[in-house]
Amino acid sequence: MNYGLNDRMPLFPLLLYGLQWLVISIPSIIILGAVTASMNQEGAAQQILYIQKLVATVGGGLIIQMLWGHRLPLVMGPASVLLVGIISATAAHADAVNTAIVLGGALLFGLGISGMFDKVQSVFTPRIVAVILALIAFTLSPVIVRMLFGRTTDVLFNFILALSLSLVMIYLNNRLPGMWRSMVVFMGLVVGTVV
């Protein structure tokens, strides 16, 4: 590791690492935001406004967690469980879903501040976490299938493109060094969008 948590980096590495985290965070924000916006917002203008609000909220959250939180630039992973909640609550009004997410976040914040999070965390054994992650994948799979095949008549082309692009991204992730490895998802998004 070149730099510690409290080290001050020179400007050029700082800009490169900042670009790396931008490249990592933007695809997940746009993908999750696009899926959520298409389910809760009508019209392209409303969907774009929703994604803009999401980017501003995530940016503010990242600044807060870097300056006053755990001081790491990004925590990826099972945060897509929020999307599962939104998908499963499509019958409810968007305001009710957003209120539930905010209340859940406030409860989690309260548990963390009060020190009671350690007691709750002991319930989540590795097996329970593995089952929850598997359930997230199974819950998101119909949405991903609809996104891949729902709007086109050329289903075989989309399947071959998605499979080959995924395999190339896995291969590049194992072969590329340093920052280029972090750009694999972004490059995959660009290539998939262009094709």
Image (spheres, grey):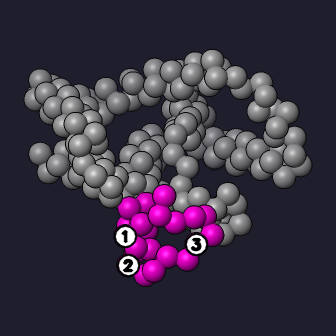
Label 3 element class: loop
| Disc 3 target residue | 7
Please state the horizontal and vertical placement of residue 102, each as a whole percent of the image: 70, 49
- Which secondary structure lies at badge 2? helix
Rounded to the nearest angstrom, the CA distance separating label 2 from label 1 is: 6 Å
Numbered tag placed on residue 174 in the rendering: none
Where is residue 86, by image quadrant? top right
Query: Could you tell me residue 49's position as x and y percent?
Result: 45, 61
Q: Nearer the viewer, residue 134 or 100?
A: 134
Residue 16's mark?
Answer: 1
For marks 3 and 1, the one nearer the N-term is 3
Q: Is residue 168 magenta?
A: no
From this viewpoint, is residue 58 visible? Answer: no
Residue 14 image offset from top left, x and y in percent: 44, 74
Q: Is residue 105 above or below residue 128?
A: below
Q: Are marks 2 and 1 in contact (CB under 8 Å)?
A: yes
CB of mark 3 within 8 Å of CB of mark 1? no
Q: Which residues are magenta?
A: 1-22
Residue type at mark 3 is: Asp
Residue in front for this viewpoint, 5 or 75: 5
**Which of the marked residues, 3 or 2, is nearer the chain's N terminus?**
3
